[in-house]
Image: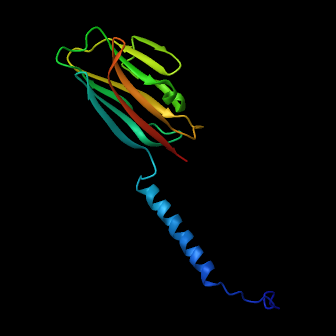
Amino acid sequence: METVSDLGTRSRGPVVQALRRAGVVVLLLVVVAGGAGLLGVRTSEATAAGGGYELTVTYPRTARAGLDAEWGVDLTAPPEGFGDQVVLAVTSDYFDFWEEQGFSPEPSAQTSDATWDYLTFDPPPGREFSLSFDAYVQPSSQRGGDGEVAVLVGDQRAVSVSFSTWLAP
């Protein structure tokens, strides 16, 4: 005795078949993009020059929650050098979605106001200064943010650069 003999066959229309095929193609594209590393962290650089300084910020243009991402600053001083200190101002809320492990080198002083984190460093020998930020994106983060880094000489900005990080779902 056959139990499916009384069930009719149902014809699938061309629209349903096209939708299924499109779904399979989209799924395949996502799998291929993930396998090729296109859905992970993407790093960019933003560079500006001014006041005799050249500033480059390396930042994650695209990142994902829970992943390590590169963020750092490279700064070239004018021929007369850095002076007594290197002072960087970084927009405070940019670091809100990071789980910080620390800066290298560590700032000799650090302060903040409602908008900026001020990082003060002892000047390196020569004209080259590099700062790296060891951090990963907080696992619960859903949104990235915009940031800006400025080099301060006294109370004045010598040079600044803006950047933006988008967090992929």
Number of numbered discs overlaid on the protein picture: 0
Closest to the observer, 36 or 77: 77
**Which residue is drawn at the image coordinates 51% and 16% (left, top)?**
113
The spot of residue 64 in percent (x, y) is: 50, 43
- Asked whether the viewer can see residue 149, the reply is yes
Q: Quadrant of residue 143?
A: top right
The spot of residue 145 in percent (x, y) is: 50, 36
Closest to the observer, 16 or 27: 16
**Which residue is drawn at the image coordinates 39% and 26% (left, top)?**
149
In what quadrant of the picture does the N terminus appear? bottom right
The spot of residue 136 in percent (x, y) is: 48, 34
Is 136 above or below relative to 77?
below
**Which residue is drawn at the image coordinates 71% and 86% (left, top)?**
10
- Asked whether the viewer can see residue 70, the reply is no
- Position of 77 compared to 119: left or right? left
Q: Quadrant of residue 75?
A: top left
- Position of 143 compared to 13: left or right? left
Looking at the image, the residue that sits furthest to the top is 84
Q: Quadrant of residue 118?
A: top left
Is 139 above or below relative to 92?
below
Looking at the image, the residue that sits furthest to the front is 156
The spot of residue 161 in percent (x, y) is: 35, 31
Is 129 above or below relative to 123?
below
